């Protein structure tokens, strides 16, 4: 898959078959669109193209009030798009100036003059351009003028999946990881670097990897304890227990942390990259009266996790 950061890097794409959108999460609805995009590209002897944006438009248009947390970082999104078999991604910088383009200007100046688009695959309810004035009907009107075809993704195809990034964010924020994973078509992921912590876990026999996501806009699931599957340095896989929260038993800050206890692992983890796939939520984050009480609960959590791994298909 080729990734172009704006049109300055763009190479000639033969018979571009294009769709447009932010595609946060690359969930089942997005996957349905990409599947159809790839099929149409093959049918028209062309290449599939996603025209997407960064930063997310809401973050630019409402910088002080957007309140948006993203399901994926840019790196995570690009990796998922490649897995879907997409051939080209154009990541266009979203600016206030860009947002003022009318829908007709966007189609003419970018899709036609810069990309020479031949086919556009679009959802029946997709809107774009200044004041979201662009629509499927407008594209159908412009097709004969600028010599491109428009293929509609039917309402039943999209509604059948009945998925949205907002629904997934809501599920994660309430700890409903099973619903989020169902809509994503895969376990929700957190990716980061292991950093030094307070080493309290080591003191009570449950050493943890403190994960720094390196992103302030990535959504974090609700506080609690989760069963996870991890990949260390893109190589070794370990199941583990993850705690998200403020560590109320030993709290000296209100900052939310992400800590993972890797089952059956020993060794130095600092500075290594860890991919965390969140499988299920075990319980709320709790405050204990002592470290000994915390240790007893962690032992119970580990017993629960090993039982789940023994009797479930994780």
Image (tube, rainbow, N blue to C red):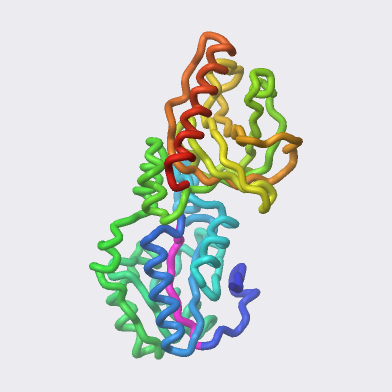
Bounds of the magenta segment: 15-24
Q: Position of residue 8 (x, y in %)?
A: 64, 74
The vertical placement of 107 against 58, above or below, is: below
Indicate the quadrant where residue 100 lies. Answer: bottom left
Q: Position of residue 151 (x, y in %)?
A: 33, 80
Residue situated in front as seen by the camera: 112 or 17: 17
The vertical placement of 72 against 79, above or below, is: above
Residue lying at the far front in this picture: please name it.
Answer: 310
Residue situated in front as seen by the camera: 140 or 19: 19
Residue situated in front as seen by the camera: 36 or 281: 281
Q: Is residue 30 left or right of residue 271?
A: left
The vertical placement of 109 against 304, above or below, is: below
Residue lying at the far top in this picture: please name it.
Answer: 289
Q: Position of residue 254 (x, y in %)?
A: 55, 23
Q: Position of residue 307 (x, y in %)?
A: 46, 34
Q: Is residue 118 left or right of residue 236?
A: left
Residue 66 is at least partly visible in this image: no
Residue drawn at (53%, 46%) of the image: 277
Residue drawn at (72%, 31%) of the image: 196
């Amino acid at each position: 898959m080729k990734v172009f950061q704006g049109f300055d890097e763009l190479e000639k794409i033969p018979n571009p078959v294009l769709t447009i959108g932010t595609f946060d999460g690359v969930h089942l609805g997005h996957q349905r669109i990409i599947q159809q995009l790839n099929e149409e590209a093959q049918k028209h002897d062309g290449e599939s193209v996603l025209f997407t944006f960064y930063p997310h438009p809401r973050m630019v248009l409402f910088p002080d009030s957007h309140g948006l947390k993203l399901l994926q970082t840019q790196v995570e999104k690009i990796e998922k798009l490649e897995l879907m078999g997409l051939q080209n991604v154009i990541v266009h910088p979203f600016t206030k100036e860009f947002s003022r383009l009318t829908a007709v200007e966007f189609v003419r100046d970018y899709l036609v003059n810069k990309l020479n688009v031949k086919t556009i695959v679009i959802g029946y309810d997709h809107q774009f351009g200044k004041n979201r004035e662009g629509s499927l009907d407008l594209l159908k009107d412009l097709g004969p003028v600028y010599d491109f075809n428009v293929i509609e993704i039917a309402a039943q195809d999209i509604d059948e999946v009945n998925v949205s990034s907002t629904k997934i964010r809501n599920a994660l924020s309430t700890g409903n990881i099973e619903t989020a994973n169902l809509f994503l078509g895969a376990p929700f992921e957190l990716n980061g670097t292991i950093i030094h912590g307070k080493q309290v876990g080591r003191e009570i026999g449950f050493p943890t990897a403190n994960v720094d996501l390196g992103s302030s806009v990535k959504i974090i699931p609700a506080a609690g304890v989760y069963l996870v599957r991890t990949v260390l340095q893109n190589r070794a896989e370990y199941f583990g227990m993850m705690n998200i929260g403020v560590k109320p038993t030993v709290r000296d800050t209100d900052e939310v942390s992400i800590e993972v206890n890797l089952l059956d692992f020993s060794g130095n983890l600092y500075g290594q990259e860890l991919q965390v796939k969140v499988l299920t939520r075990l319980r709320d984050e709790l405050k204990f009266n002592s470290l000994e009480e915390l240790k007893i609960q962690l032992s119970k959590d580990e017993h629960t996790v090993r039982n789940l791994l023994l009797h479930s298909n994780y």
